[in-house]
Image (spheres, rainbow, N blue to C red):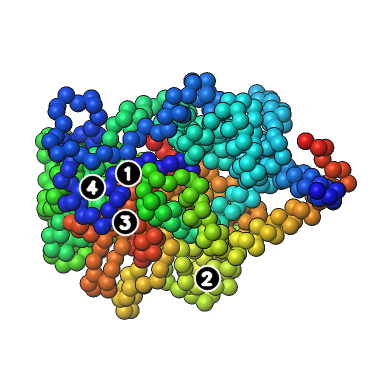
Amino acid sequence: MSASNVGSEQLKAGLEQRLVESGEKERLQDLIRAKLVESGWKDQVKAQCREVIKEKGIANITVEELLQAVVPSARENVPDEVKAKVLSRLKGFLLTNLQDLEQQPTPPL
Amino acid sequence: MPKARPTSGGSSTTATLADWGTASSTSTMSVTLQGKSNTPAPSPVPPPVPTTSGCSHLTQAKPTTAQRYRVFVKYSLFQQHHHTFTDRFRSNQQTLPALKSVRASRLEAKRDAILKRIPFPQCTQCGTAIGRVLLCLYCEFTGCWKHGHIQSHMASNRHNLAVEMSSYTVYCGLCQDYVYSHNYEEILRQERFRMYYRLCQLANPTAKRIPTIKCLTAPVLSLESQEALAMPCDGIRGLRNMGSTCFMNVILQAFVHNPLLQTHFLSDPHDSRACSREACIACEMNSLFEQVFSGNHTPYGPTTFLRSIWQASTELSGYSQKDAHEFFITALNQIHAGFSKNERTLDCTCVVHQTFAGELQSTVTCLNCKRKTVANDPMLDISLDLRPLPKKGREQGQLSQVPHSLLECLQRFTTAETLGAKEYTCSHCGSECKEATKQLLIKSLPPVLSFQLKRFEHLASASKIESLIRIPLELDMTPYTTQSQSTARPAHSLNAFDEQAVASNPACHYRLFAVINHEGSLETGHYTMYALHRKEWFRFDDDLVTLAKLGDILKNKAYMCFYVRSFLDYSPA
């Protein structure tokens, strides 16, 4: 692993920590949750999960298998509007936090 | 996500009720205890049903593990709502300084100090804080799923149980899956309830609530945890069509599957033998519930109910097709009359008003003198307009011309509308020619919210609006209440949860339990309905009852829909 790679890994961890500590992660999650309910995405995915479980039988399926069956299409079906909104919020967060993180990197864990 | 509890009959999606009913006994008890009954088992041995006891590793874990689980749940719940607390405290301090005693503020300072000391959850090995992060139930280890840190920890230390931070579910390394146990679910319920209570308090500090302790110690009738099995089709019975009576059947099914009415009428609230009222609908409701929960699965014809309604309301009598909503309102009024002699409906304690009654607030603002006139009106349900907006309404913002979802309908319902020049005369400034705006908001929400989507138009020419309206399974009513509008919200925005949004009040969260559909035209058509029964959706078409797919329910052109509050203050489940 090159030095710059280590640096970017550290930076990423630092940013993640900030995202959580500032409460921004939960705020974003609330926003995403509300948006996905509003657009009907959540109900759609729920219906899909039930289908998969019924098909395989409740005793023969694990959460991992369910995820494999549902995640790809669910990810694709997220409305573009929601993606754009979340991206712009994240960009805003990055811009305000990147600069002062680069100046004083977080101590190694 | 915990493993869903096995539900009966999940194998066949098209089985009719008659196929199902054959195996079950005729006892009126809703559950039969396995191995505890004295009577010998019935001769045809029922097929093996998966047990409902949950993961054995989790059930047999030490009590201290359960205690650790409780602490972790508290911690995770708190982490999840941390920002709500900090954001809200600040705004409350500004708006409600008088409410805060010295003691309360000291407590708060203490809490804030503790808050700062609680570490944020991140993987002990790589520091990942996003995605699936699990806490070991045996030691201090926290690990992420993405890089396999928690899995390797569980395998190498033989610590087989860990809690996931965001869903509060337990992962069992021996089962290789997320698992549940009734004991742990109960812990989660209690802690969730505590958090719900605190969030409600935070969202609306002045509201009166039942003390948490009373709600938490309410007896929980958990027969499932005693290895009991639910009877397959208990509480499900088709209703015969007695000549265009599907309008009545759908509403009766919606009553039967209403959790509040169910609890009320199964507790035998009305003594039919002592009742001397003629055509008493309360007596009829009693016998309806008796019939549905009798264990008999052959379709039932509610003839006496129909006769009583005919006697009570001349408009609903006769063999022609009727409007389900009209029947709904008439039936509610008649049930109310059976329980209470009180004419006032606002503070009535009868089951109808305790279940369905809310209050609407209409505010008229004179644009000339800015004076506001407020009026409160009782409501039993909300009727939502589906007609395209007139041109002048469209200028007001992002509201689309035709609504596509229930949320959009509600948005329209609560948007201030401009009254025409001669529609309103301000009593204060007396100006007649000036304009005014009128806004409707919900002042108090009932435990059960019912909506009517006005598909039938009776203007110059009667017609039916056939547009598809999306009905969400979960509904947050916070943005449509007076409370949210009073706490500084920017000009009405379509996106209720935009940047400057009000924190959602969990007391305003609802979930769908019944939908009524109308197929056909205005003059002639057929009513069917979907209802939620023990976490499974069923389709009721008069005497035919079938398992329903969630996807079908969401795709239908609903006429009425019913929501129940997600958290009932006294309810254990």
- Residue B438 lies, in percent from the top left, at 51, 62
Q: Earlier in the sequence, mark 2 or mark 4?
A: 4
Relative depth, front residue between B509 and B59 = B59
Label 3, label 4: how many angstroms apart (C-alpha)?
A: 13 Å
Q: Which mark is residue B548?
A: 3
Q: What number is the disc on residue B400?
A: 2
Can residue B375 be seen from the camera position used here? Answer: no
Q: Amino acid at mark 4?
A: Ile
Say which element carries label 3: loop
Q: Which residue is mark 1?
A: B7
In the displayed structure, would residue B87 be above or below residue A87? above
Asked if badge 2 and badge 4 are on a common chain, one would say yes
At label 1, the amino acid type is Thr
Residue A66, image x and y in percent? 47, 50
> Residues at marks 1 and 2, common chain?
yes
Q: State the CA–CA distance, disc 1 to disc 2.
A: 41 Å
Choose top left, top right, bottom left or bottom right for residue B493.
bottom right
- The subunit carrying tag 1 is B
Amino acid type at mark 2 = Ser
Q: Which residue is mark 4?
A: B236
Q: Which quarter of the figure is the C terminus of chain A placed in?
A: top right
